[in-house]
Image: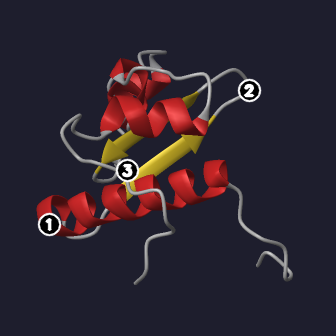
């Protein structure tokens, strides 16, 4: 993955936050964690956006609550992946300086 290069402090922090988010997903949502990157921002949620489509409403042009669009639209957007995790994770979880193992 890192091809023999040392992992930076920033990369270690991202890895720790990802693992914490994954643990929350396993504990609370049967492992489902959705991380989305758009052109201008990132979004994250526990679970999976609803994948069913209300075809009559969608065909009428109302996609607000169809196919997970409404769920995703309501999520806050963040400028970076790190900010996404910081906004998502409980604030009382300490992150260690060393890379998290296992």
Comes first in the chain, label 2 or label 1: 1
Q: Residue at x 52, y 23 (%)?
A: 78
- Image quarter (top left, top right, bottom left or bottom right) of the C terminus: bottom left
The residue sitting at 64% across, 48% down in the picture is 10
In the rendered image, is residue 9 in sight?
A: yes
Which of the numbered marks, if any, corresponds to residue 39?
Answer: 2
Q: Nearer the viewer, residue 73 or 14?
A: 14
Where is residue 13? Give x, y as percent: 52, 52
Q: Earlier in the sequence, mark 3 or mark 2?
A: 2
Identify whether 51 is placed above or below 92. Answer: below
User: In the image, is 99 to the left or to the right of 67?
Assistant: right
- Return the residue at label 1: 27
Image quadrant in which the N terminus is located: bottom right
Secondary element at image label 3: loop
Q: Is residue 57 above or below residue 8?
A: above
Marked residue nearer the N-terminal end (3 or 1): 1
Compared to 9, does 81 lie above or below?
A: above
């Amino acid at each position: 993955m890192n091809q023999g290069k040392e992992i930076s402090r920033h990369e270690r922090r991202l890895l720790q936050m990802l693992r914490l988010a994954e643990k929350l997903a396993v504990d609370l949502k049967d492992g489902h964690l959705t991380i989305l990157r758009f052109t201008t921002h990132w979004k994250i949620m526990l679970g999976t956006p609803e994948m069913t489509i209300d075809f009559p409403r969608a065909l009428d042009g109302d996609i607000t609550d169809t196919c997970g669009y409404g769920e995703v639209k309501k999520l806050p957007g963040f400028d970076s992946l790190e900010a996404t995790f910081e906004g998502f994770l409980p604030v009382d979880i300490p992150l260690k300086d060393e890379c998290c193992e296992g």
